[in-house]
Image: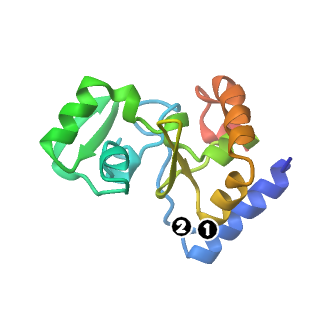
Amino acid sequence: MLNKRGFIAIAAAVFVAAGLSGAAPAFAAGPGPDVNVTITGLALRGYDPVAYFTDGKPVPGDFTITAQYGGATYRFASEGHKALFVKDPIKYLPQYGGFCAFGTAQGYKVDGDPNVWKIVDNRLYLNLAPPVATRWNQDVPGNIKAANDKWPALKDKAPSELQ
C-alpha cells in the first residue's frame, strides 16, 4: 500500500512534470466537499458525463446546455445527453464525486482529470494523471473496494483536512 508521503510525492511529481503546479482546479466551491468542482461550481471541468458512456470518450460540454445536481453544474454536448442525465444522474456521475479514484483508495481527495478515466461495471472513475492511473490499473478491483470502503469517511471532508 502506498503511504501518505509516497502518494503526495507522486501527485507533486505529476503536477511539476505537467507544469500544473499553480493551475490545478479548485476542489469544492458551491456544492460541498463531496463533489470535485471548479471555483465556479462546474463539475468534470465542463466535460459531458453522459458522453463517456454514449461516445466512449470525454467530450467537452456546451456552456449553454447545463443541469444542476448536488449543487454542481454539469455541461452536456447535446440536449439528448442532458435529458439522459436528468432522467438518471446517478448512472452518469463519476464515482467519489469526481475525485481521483486511486487517491480515494489511498485515503485522499485529489483532483480527478476528466481525460484520465475508465468505466468499470458501468461506473465512471477518474484519476489524477496517467502515472496514477497506471498504479490504479494494477489492481482495479482492489482499489475500487478500498475506495468504496474509505469514501464514506472522506466524502464530507475538505481535501485540505486529509493532508
Residue name at image x 62 percent, y 41 percent: 159
Q: Is residue 74 left or right of residue 127?
A: left
Q: Position of residue 71 (x, y in %)?
A: 35, 29
With respect to residue 94, does 138 lie above or below? below
Residue 135's image quarter?
Answer: bottom right
Q: Position of residue 64 (x, y in %)?
A: 13, 48
Q: Nearer the viewer, residue 91 or 8?
A: 91
- Foreground residue, 27 or 120? 120
Q: CA distance from mark 2 to mark 1?
A: 9 Å
Badge 2 density bin: few <14, some 14–19, many ≥20, Cα 10 Å = few
Q: Position of residue 121 (x, y in %)?
A: 53, 36
Q: Nearer the viewer, residue 131 or 84?
A: 84
Residue 124 seen in the figure: yes
Q: Is residue 28 left or right of residue 17?
A: left
Picture quarter with the C terminus: top right
Q: Residue furthest front?
A: 121
- Is residue 70 at all visible to an observer of this figure? no
The residue lying at 68 percent from left, 61 percent from top is: 134
Q: Dot 2 corresponds to which residue?
A: 22
Q: Residue at x 65, y 68 (%)?
A: 14
Q: Which residue is mark 1?
A: 15
Q: Amino acid at mark 1?
A: Phe
